[in-house]
C-alpha cells in the first residue's frame, strides 16, 4: 500500500497566496473552527491592467512600477508590463465583435497583438526601487502586467499622462487596476462639454462579455448597445459613453458588470474647458464611505452619490478638516433616491484647508457608492481631478511616480486616532529610502510633511503603513506646471492586499491511497 499525504489546508493556503484572496476556515455546527489562528503570508502572484492612455498626439505618458520590500517572499520572481494588443471589435459597443484579419505592414488586426507586443514596456529590477517606462502619442495601447515571487506583494503601477492642449488637457493619472467582474463609477457624464470613455481591458486568453449600465438623476438611462459587449482576449476597448445613450446628463453613474471572464475598468473623463483626469472605481457599495484628501486650494467640489437598488439612502455629510469634523453649511444631509444618481455642489468648501468627506447613514444603513469632482484654478487655467470613495490603507498602501516638489499626502482618521509610518523609497535613478511616523487625530485630515529620499534622483514611491489605532484613509496629489496651468491628479491609497491570511490546521488532513 502506497501512502500519499495530501494536506488540504496546505493546498488552500497555496491557492490563497497565489490569488491574493483568503480561503479561511470551515466552522463546525457549534461555530468552533478547526483551524488555529491564521498566519499572514505574502501573495505569490498578482496581475494589473493599464488602460490606453490617450487619443491625443500631444500626450506624453510615464509608467512607474514599484514593489515594497516584504519579508517572507521567495528569492526570485519578476514583474513586467506588456502591450495588451490593439482594440477589439470593429466598433466600440458592438455586440459580439469579432477579430479582423491582420493588416498590412506586419501589424496585427484588431484584437491581435502588434509585432512589438512581446517586448515589455518596463521590467522591475528589485523590490524597494521604482522603475519607469515611457510612451508618447495616440497609438499607445492598453497594457497587461504580471508580477510573481518577491515582486508580487503590494505591486503598484501608475500611469501618468501630460496632455499639452485640447479636450482633457492637463495631468491625467490612474493606478493600474486588478482585473475584476464589477465596477461602479459615480461622477461620469454624457453632457455636451464632456467626452467620457469607459476603458475595458481583458488580460486573459478568452473573450470577456461585459454589460454597461448608466444611471442619471431620474434612474436608468436608456442605452442601445450597452449589453453583451465582447472584449477580445489580450485587448483593450475604449467605449464612448455618448454612443450608448442619447440622453445628455451632467452626473451619471456607470455600472460595469462582467457576464463571463474578467476585465480591468477605468473611466477617462475629458472636459472641453476644465481639463480632465481618470475616474477610478468607487469602493463597493456600503453604508459608510470616506473620500480622502481633497486639496486645500480646490475652487469647486461636486459630490456624486448613487444608491443601487430601490431603497432610498439618507446620509450625513461631514468634512474631516485639520482641526476636526465639521458640517458643510447648507449640506448637512443628502437624500439619495434608490436607483438614481444625486449630486451636490459644495463650492469652495475647503477654504484653504485640506479635508476629506465622510458619509454616514442618517438612520438605517443603505449601500451607496460615491466620488467627488475637484476643480482647481480659475478661468482658462482650471483643471479637474476625481476622488472616489476608497478602502482604508489597512496594513499597507503605496503611491508611485512622486516628485520632490510636486507631491502632497493627505491622511484622515475618521473614527479614532491612529499612528502611521510613511516611507519614501529609493529614487528610480538614485537616492536612499527614509521613513517618518505621524499621529493623525480622530476626525481630522492631515496634510503630512512628505519625506523625500536623501540624494533623490528620478521619482520615488510613498508607502503608508498603519502602526496603531483606528482605520486611516489616504490620497496623494501630484502637481505639475503645464503651460501656465497648475495641472494635478489625485490617487487614493487603498490597502495593497499584499498579504493573505492562511490558517494552520490542528492536524494533518491526509488521505490514504492504495
Image (cartoon, rainbow, N blue to C red):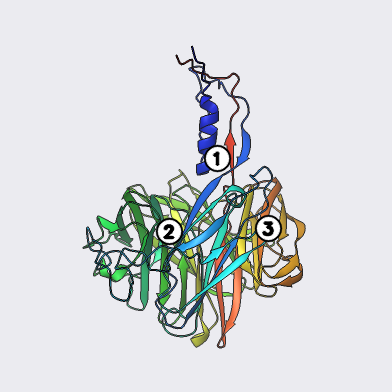
Q: Earlier in the sequence, mark 2 or mark 3?
A: 3
Image spot of residue 97 (x, y percent)? 23, 61
Q: Earlier in the sequence, mark 1 or mark 2?
A: 1
Image spot of residue 144 (x, y percent)? 45, 59
To which quarter of the image does residue 408 belong? bottom right
Around disc 2, counting alpha carbons within 10 Å, would you say few (fewer than 14), some (14 to 19), or many (20 or more)?
Answer: many
Q: Residue at x 54, y 33 (%)?
A: 13
Q: Earlier in the sequence, mark 3 or mark 1?
A: 1
Residue under numbered circle 3: 128
Look at discs 2 and 3 and give the one toward the viewer.
3
To which quarter of the image does residue 240 belong? bottom left
Residue under numbered circle 1: 17
Secondary structure found at label 3: loop
Judge from the rendering whether residue 6 lies leftward or rightward of residue 480; answer left or right.
left
Secondary structure found at label 1: helix
Look at discs 1 and 2 and give the one toward the viewer.
1
Amino acid at each position: 500500500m502506497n501512502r500519499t499525504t495530501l494536506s488540504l489546508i496546505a493546498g488552500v493556503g497555496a491557492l490563497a497566496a497565489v490569488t491574493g484572496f483568503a480561503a479561511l476556515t470551515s466552522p463546525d455546527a457549534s461555530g468552533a473552527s478547526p483551524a488555529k489562528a491564521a498566519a499572514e503570508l505574502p501573495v505569490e502572484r498578482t496581475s494589473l491592467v493599464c488602460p490606453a492612455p490617450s487619443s491625443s498626439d500631444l500626450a506624453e505618458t510615464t509608467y512607474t512600477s514599484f514593489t515594497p520590500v516584504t519579508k517572507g517572499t521567495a528569492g526570485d520572481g519578476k514583474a513586467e508590463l506588456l502591450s495588451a494588443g490593439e482594440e477589439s471589435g470593429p466598433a466600440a459597443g458592438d455586440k459580439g465583435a469579432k477579430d479582423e484579419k491582420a493588416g498590412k505592414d506586419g501589424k496585427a488586426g484588431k484584437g491581435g497583438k502588434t509585432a512589438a507586443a512581446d517586448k515589455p514596456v518596463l521590467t522591475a529590477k528589485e523590490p524597494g526601487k521604482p522603475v519607469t517606462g515611457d510612451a508618447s502619442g495616440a497609438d499607445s495601447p492598453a497594457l497587461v502586467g504580471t508580477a510573481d515571487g518577491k515582486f508580487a506583494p503590494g505591486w503598484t503601477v501608475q500611469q501618468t499622462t501630460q496632455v499639452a492642449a485640447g479636450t482633457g488637457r492637463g495631468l491625467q493619472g490612474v493606478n493600474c487596476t486588478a482585473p475584476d467582474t464589477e465596477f461602479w463609477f459615480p461622477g461620469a457624464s454624457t453632457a455636451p462639454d464632456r467626452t467620457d470613455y469607459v476603458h475595458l481591458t481583458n488580460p486573459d486568453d478568452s473573450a470577456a462579455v461585459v454589460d454597461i449600465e448608466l444611471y442619471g438623476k431620474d434612474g436608468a438611462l436608456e442605452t442601445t448597445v450597452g449589453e453583451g459587449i465582447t472584449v477580445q482576449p489580450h485587448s483593450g476597448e475604449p467605449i464612448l459613453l455618448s454612443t450608448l445613450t442619447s440622453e445628455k446628463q451632467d452626473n451619471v453613474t456607470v455600472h460595469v458588470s462582467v457576464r463571463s471572464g474578467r476585465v480591468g475598468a477605468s473611466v477617462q473623463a475629458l472636459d472641453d474647458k476644465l481639463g480632465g483626469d481618470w475616474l477610478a472605481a468607487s469602493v463597493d457599495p456600503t453604508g459608510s464611505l470616506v473620500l480622502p484628501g481633497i486639496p486645500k486650494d480646490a475652487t469647486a467640489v461636486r459630490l456624486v452619490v448613487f444608491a443601487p437598488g430601490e431603497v432610498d439612502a439618507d446620509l450625513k455629510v461631514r468634512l474631516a478638516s485639520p482641526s476636526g469634523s465639521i458640517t458643510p453649511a447648507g449640506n448637512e444631509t443628502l437624500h439619495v433616491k434608490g436607483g438614481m444618481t444625486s449630486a451636490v455642489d459644495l463650492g469652495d468648501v475647503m477654504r484653504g484647508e485640506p479635508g476629506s468627506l465622510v458619509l454616514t447613514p442618517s438612520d438605517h444603513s443603505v449601500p451607496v457608492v460615491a466620488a467627488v469632482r475637484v476643480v482647481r484654478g480659475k478661468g482658462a487655467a482650471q483643471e479637474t481631478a476625481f476622488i472616489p470613495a476608497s478602502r482604508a490603507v489597512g496594513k499597507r498602501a503605496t503611491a508611485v511616480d512622486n516628485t520632490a516638489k510636486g507631491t502632497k499626502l493627505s491622511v484622515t482618521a475618521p473614527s479614532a486616532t491612529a499612528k502611521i509610518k510613511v516611507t519614501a523609497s529609493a529614487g528610480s535613478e538614485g537616492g536612499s529610502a527614509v521613513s517618518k511616523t505621524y499621529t493623525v487625530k480622530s476626525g481630522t485630515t492631515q496634510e503630512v510633511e512628505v519625506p523625500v529620499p536623501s540624494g533623490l534622483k528620478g521619482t520615488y514611491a510613498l508607502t503608508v503603513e498603519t502602526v496603531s489605532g483606528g482605520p486611516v484613509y489616504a490620497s496623494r496629489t501630484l502637481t505639475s506646471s503645464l503651460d501656465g496651468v497648475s495641472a494635478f491628479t489625485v490617487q487614493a491609497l487603498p490597502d495593497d492586499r499584499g498579504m493573505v491570511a492562511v490558517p494552520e490546521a490542528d492536524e494533518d488532513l491526509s488521505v490514504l491511497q492504495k
